[in-house]
Amino acid sequence: MIRVLIVEDEPPIQRRTKRMIEHIDEDFCVAAIAGDGEEALEKMRAEHFDVLFTDIRMPVMNGMKLMTQVRQHYPDCSIVVLSGYQDFDYVSAAVRAQAVDYLLKPIAEETLEKLLFKLKERFIAQKQEHIQLSVAARLHHTLPDSAPDGLQAVNLGICLFCAGALPQSADAALFDEVPDIWQAVSLTAMAKSLCRESLLFLQEFTGESPAERVIVYQQSDTIDPHWTQQLYHNVLKQRKLFINCVCLQDSVPVSEIASAYKRLRRLLADRIVIGEDGFSAVEYQTLETRKPESGDFVEDASAALQYADTIAGGNPQLTAAFRRTMFERFTQERWTHRRILSFYQRVGTLLDAKLPDPGKAPISREWFYNAVSMASSYEELAEIVRSLEHTSPVIDEKNDTTAKVLSYLNASYREHITGQTLARKFGYVPSYISFLFRQAYGQSPADYLTTLRISKAKELMSSQPTLLIREVAEQVGFKNPYHFSRVFKKNEGQWPTEYKG
C-alpha cells in the first residue's frame, strides 16, 4: 500500500483529492490530511508517507518551505504540487524540491490517473532499491540483522546455489574455474523467465566464495510454489560442475536474511556429496531448530590413525591400497564433503604428531585441506591425494610438472591459455595443476600469466612507442584491447596510454 499525505487548507479540495486518488487506484491510501506545512511535518515525524500532495499557498507554513524540509529530512518521499497558480517562483520551488509533478487545480481525473501510474512505478523502483541495498549490506556484514531500515514489513525468500564442493578455503584463486560457470548461467534471467510478473523483487548476489550464488526475492501469492526447484533443474542443464541448492520454503523478514543465509550455508555444508547434485527446500523454523552435525566424526578416528600410520611407514603399496579402500568407503557410504574434509584434517594432524620434525612431513594439513576443498569429483580428489602421499611439501623449480608448466607459460604467453589448455597438455585436472603451481611459485598459473603479459606489454611500449594499444594487446596474448587496458590499470595503477606518455 502506498501511503499518501495531502496538505491543503481548503476542506472541499481535501475531500475531493482524497476521493479521486483512492477511486482511481486502490494501491494508494490517503493515510492523513494536514491543513498547513507545520501540521504536515508533525504528521511526517510520527508516521511514514510515500507521497506528499501539497498546495503552495497555505497559512503558518507554505508549500515552498514544506518542500524544502521534506526534501532535506525525507528524501525518499515523492512530492506532487497542487496549485491554483502557474507562478514562475512556485514552479521553480517545485523543481528545486525535485517534485514529481506540478498540477493546476482543479485536477482532471485523467491527469491524476497518469500521475498515479508514474508514482507507483517510482515507488516500486525505490522500494526494490531499498531492499537490494538492505539485503546486500546484511549479506556482506556491513549492517547488523537487528538494524531498522523501514523494511520491517517486507518478507523475502532466499536460495543458495553452489557450484562444486562448498569451498572451505578462503583462497579464491583455488577456484579459478568456478566464476566462469556463474558468468555463463544467469540465475536472475532464468528466474524472471520462469516467474514473469510473479516476482516483486529479485536480486542475485555472490556468496562467501566464488562458488556460491545467492538469489533473494519477494514473490506474489500467485506464483508456482515449486518454481525454485524448476530453476535448479534449469541450472543443471547448463552446468559444468555438480550443483547443489538449498532454499527456504517460506519467507523471512529483511532483518533475518543474513541469518537465513548462514543457516542455509551450514545446511549445505552438511549435505554436499562430492560429485553429486542436490536440491533441498526447508522451512525457516526447521533451520532455526536444526542441530548441526558435530563435525568430529569420531567413528572415523581409527581409520584416520591407520591411514596416518601407513603413510608414515613409507610403503607406497600399502598406502595406495589403504587409499583405495577409503575411497571405496567414501563412494559406497556417500560420505559428505564435510566428513571427508574432517577425516583428512585428522590424518594431517596425526602425521604432524608422529614425526619429530613436522616441517618435513610428506604431507601437511594445509595440503589436505586445500585438496579436499577444491575437489569436483572423487577421481580428481583421488588423483590429488595420491600425488600428495608421495610429494614433499617443498616444491621448487626442479619439480618436473611445475617446471614444465612454467616453461610453457613463458614460451606461449601470446596464445589463448586456459586451465583446460594446461590440463590437455600436462595430463592433470586444472585444479591440480593450479594447486601444484601455487605451492611452487606462490601464485596460480592464471595470475602468473597475467603478470608476465603485463611485463611483456611494458617492454613493448618502451621499445616500440609507436605501437597502438590494440597491437600491444594482441602481441602479448590479450584478444580484447579494452580488457587489456583494464587489467593493465588494475596491475600498474595507470592506463596503458598514461604509461606510454
Image: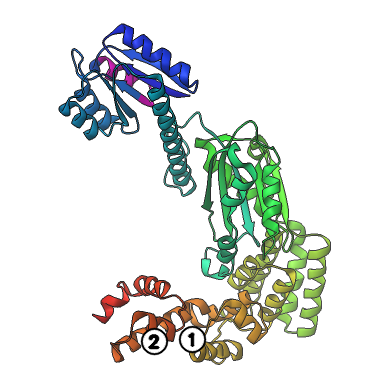
Q: Mark 1 belongs to which amino acid?
A: Tyr
Quarter the C terminus occupies: bottom left
- Reply above or below: 60 against 195: above
Crowd band around label 1 with a 10 angstrom C-alpha radius: few (<14), some (14–19), many (20+): some
Residue 357 seen in the figure: no
Who's the residue at 33% across and 23% down the image?
52
Residue nearer the viewer, 332 or 405:
405
Q: Are circles 1 and 2 on residues that touch, CB within 8 Å?
A: yes
Residue type at mark 2?
Lys
Relative to 380, say whether 127 is above or below. Answer: above
Q: Position of residue 233 (x, y in %)?
A: 71, 53
Who's the residue at 70% across and 62% down the image?
Answer: 242
In the image, 404 versus 391, the foreground residue is 404
Please name the residue shown 67% across and 38% down the image: 249
> Which residue is identified by label 1?
413
Please identify the residue farthest to the top as the structure is shown.
Answer: 12
Q: Is the magenta stretch mostly helix, strand or loop?
A: helix
Task: Report the span colored magenta.
Answer: 39-51
Label annotation for residue 355: none
**Is residue 19 among what the camera can see?**
yes
